[in-house]
Amino acid sequence: MKSLEKKIKKTELLIKARKAQLDTESQSLALIRQRKIAQLQELDRHQKNYINGVNDLNIERQTGDRRMLSTIERSVDHSKSQWYKSLREVKTWEEKEKQQIEQVLLAQRNLKSMEKVQENHFQALKKEVDVREQKEMDDLSVQRFARNR
């Protein structure tokens, strides 16, 4: 019985540690998601700049005056470059998010397994207590029976 109580105390400490790990991993995931959202907003901004630049470029090409054509082309190229760079960043954050989700799931599985171990220890302790109580009741019954004879 003492060993089961010790095991239960140890599992309680491990469960606290696993909960702390799960909280840490969940906070990291939330931070990654915030950064990914910020990067998606940046991607959207660069995409709009690129599309507006292409529209301006098409308008400039249709006019007879092409003095600003090379400047607008460079601006569109820069916008496209920024858009692509932002897209790569989004993909990087998505990969980090995927990896962090795996870490959160692993932390959840670890916590669940420790909770199951603790539950098994509780059941074993209850069974041991029930057996001990039954033995005491049997001993009392035998003593009463012996006295009454």
Image (cartoon, grey):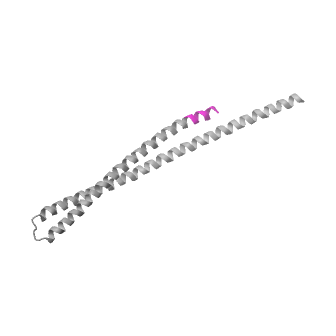
Q: Which residue is drawn at 29% across and 58% down?
A: 44
Left or right of 105, for residue 127:
right
Above/below status of 58 relative to 22? below
Left or right of 88, for residue 9:
right
Residue 24: percent from the left, percent from the top?
A: 42, 42
Above/below status of 11 relative to 50? above
The answer to which quarter of the image holds residue 56 is bottom left
Q: Residue at x 43, y 46 (%)?
A: 26
Residue 85: percent from the left, percent from the top?
A: 26, 56
Overall secondary structure of the magenta stretch?
Answer: helix
Q: Residue at x 62, y 31 (%)?
A: 2
Farthest-out residue, right: 149
Above/below status of 76 relative to 100? below
Residue 81: percent from the left, percent from the top?
A: 22, 58
Does the rendering let one see residue 90?
A: yes
The answer to which quarter of the image holds residue 134 is top right
Give yes or no for residue 62 being in the magenta stretch: no
Q: In which quarter of the image is the N terminus?
A: top right
Farthest-out residue, top: 147
Q: Which residue is drawn at 49% across and 47% down?
A: 108
Which range of residues does the magenta coloring cover? 1-9
